[in-house]
Image (tube, rainbow, N blue to C red):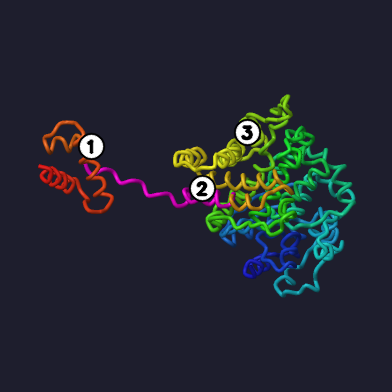
Amino acid sequence: MNSIFQLIADLADQPVWLAGGAVRALLSGQTPVDLDLATTGSGLALAKAIADAGGGAFVALDRERDTGRAVLPGGITIDCAALRAADIEGDLRLRDFTINALALPLAAVLAGDWSALIDPLGGRDDLAAGRLRLCAPTSLRDDPLRVVRAGRFRATHRLHPDPDLIAAARAAAPLLVNVAVERIRDELLKTCDGPAAAAGLRLLDEVGALTIIFPELEPARACDQPRVHFLPVLAHMLETVAALDWLIDDGDPPVAVQTYPQLSRDLPFPDQYHEVLNQRRGIVRRAALLKLAALLHDNAKPQTKVSHPDGTVTFYGHQSLGAETVAQIGKRLRLSRADTSYLVSVVHEHMRPGQMRDSEQLSERGINRFFRDTGDTGPDILLHELADHLATRGPWLDPVAWQRHLAWLGAMLDRYWNPPAPPAPPLIRGDELMAALQIGPGPEVGRLLKLIHEAQLAGDIHSAEEALALARTLRMAEH
């Protein structure tokens, strides 16, 4: 990273500061993934110079605000912006949260000199205290997207918003209808990518933003469920996200785990799951899409709820109707076709593993049909069902049944990641055998084919010629 800082220093003909998240990462002892630079010169010109010198690509992000981006080989992104105030301190005061109102002169970055840190609003102390605080009372009204970004920082950095931020977010949330959907989508996906995604989404719900983004979820808020569930529908979906946080990212424990702290989360095939869930899907991991699917998986329960005279409640068809709704949500958020298809698959099939598990037996045909229908989404759907179960039972979870559930999951996944070798094609067909031996159809042909197949499986024969020789030997032995 120092070589990149030196490259920037060599190119800059105006004062340059490293700002925002990159400074926050360095303060936390991490290597920043992306860089934000502020300069008294032109941000567009600096980004163009960095891209040209580093063999990367240049993108003009905002010509009106003189902001450009350089994308260097290896995927490092460097955003360069001209100051929006008379000096760097004034520029920082215009930012969203105090933890982002941090800057370090480029020369100090190269020297590792933290005494030069510019921190006009106490962001360093807020970061240490795990506190999320606004730079100014108008910060959220200035850009309502920052309401969603607050949820993202709650999810990714586990920061706790102060009361003033909560009040300001409630006031600004209705203004999200005026924000470009692509900007909301990206912040929402980053929220779901955090280890505390449920906490971030719950913050959005607390301030009224969640159902502005997803109005389809509002009817689920007061939709009660049968006694097997301990939460109404919307709270259940959020609890399912919390269960995935715990299972995938060592996140805060859901209620079931708070009740039974020793509950095992030793997933079968952990290496394979780690590889699958950490695949990049655009700006986030695949795990983020699974958590988003969990947030939406029961969206159609209010529309399909039927209370029966015997006191039972059913939601027949909610998974199919819910999948149709999710397809529309994906289109509205302008998700890629692949990502929308993934969400639809998880929502449409989320009931199926539980139905298979209730049958108390794993048939070869049922397993093959499940993975045939779900494709590479199958392991994700199985993991979702595990989280859904935690969120359903909550404090009523049976720890012994949980261990059986994990074992069942392992048996399913064993057939996915360790499939049996396909049977070898027969060495000879029945018509070929009859022609070679000059015999007609009948039980003798079937008997010989069976014996040939057994010898093939045992590795005693390997070709059609050897199969015919064995058949002749068997015929001679009988006569």
Q: Quadrant of residue 355?
A: top right
Give me the C-alpha separation between circle 1 and circle 2.
35 Å
Residue on which disc 1 sits: 446
Which element is circle 3 on? Answer: helix
Along the horizontal axis of the image, is 443 left or right of 306?
A: left
Q: Which mark, residue 319?
A: 3
Q: Earlier in the sequence, mark 2 or mark 3?
A: 3
**Bounds of the magenta segment:** 405-429
- Work out whether residue 25 or residue 397 is closer to the camera in this orientation and state it: 397
Residue 341 visible? The answer is no
In the rendered structure, which amino acid carries the disc numbered 3?
Gln
Q: Residues within 10 Å of mark 1 (few under 14, many from 20)?
A: few
Q: Residue at x 86, y 63 (%)?
A: 122
Residue 336, located in which quarter of the rendered image? top right
Q: Nearer the viewer, residue 377 or 278?
A: 377
- The answer for how far apart the CA atoms under marks 1 and 3 are is 47 Å
Q: Earlier in the sequence, mark 1 or mark 3?
A: 3
Tell me residue 440's x, y (percent): 15, 31
Q: Are marks 1 and 3 in contact (CB under 8 Å)?
A: no
Residue depth check, mark 1 versus mark 3: number of the one nearer the observer: 1
Mark 2 = which residue? 412
Residue type beneath disc 1? Gly
